[in-house]
Image (cartoon, rainbow, N blue to C red):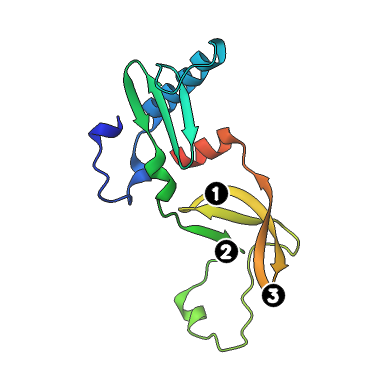
Amino acid sequence: MADDLDFESFDNLDDLDWSELEKDVKEGAADQAGAAPAAGGEPGAIVSGGNEAVISKDSHAIDIHYLLDVDLQVTVEVGRRLYFVSDILTWDPGSIIELDKVVGEPLNLLVNGKLVAKGEVVVVHDKFALKITEILDPQDRLQFLQN
């Protein structure tokens, strides 16, 4: 599958159909769980070392280590609110913008615009940070990716 794709740009990774790769990974993991530990190059072996992961199966390899350097946009969403342009034009420094979140409610962590986790604000070395308190269930994350 990876051999058929053009990776000059990673802009449309969300639009790709990863189901075949996921199936190969699951089958490889199931084969590995039922078999004795295999050497690095044997079919069905899962090899990981350093910054690479290779899944060898039926004499073809899927090398996904290039995904480790893909830039992703990580966003912490404090809240949302729909405003008309006329309202925005009346804002001055010091204006208060009401959002849809309540104080103490978990903030959303989005990766490339997709919700993957929730967390709370903490201060680390005089900077704001997000402490992850909940990671969405893998099934929920897959559902968000499909939408």
Q: Amino acid at mark 1?
A: Leu
Image coordinates of residue 33 in percent, x first then y, are 56, 15
Q: Amino acid at mark 3?
A: Asp
Is tag 1's residue or tag 2's residue first in the polypeptide sequence? 2
Q: Residue at x 47, y 25 (%)?
A: 46
Mark linked to residue 126: 3
Is tag 3's residue or tag 1's residue first in the polypeptide sequence? 1
Residue designated by label 2:
80
Mark 1 burial class by Cα count in 10 Å: few <14, some 14-19, many 20+: many
Image position of 44 with respect to 144: above or below: above
Q: Is residue 8 left or right of residue 87?
A: left
Residue found at the far top of this picture: 35
Mark 2 burial class by Cα count in 10 Å: few <14, some 14-19, many 20+: few
**Marks 1/2: CA distance?**
14 Å
Image position of 61 with respect to 124: above or below: above
Q: Secondary structure at mark 2?
A: loop
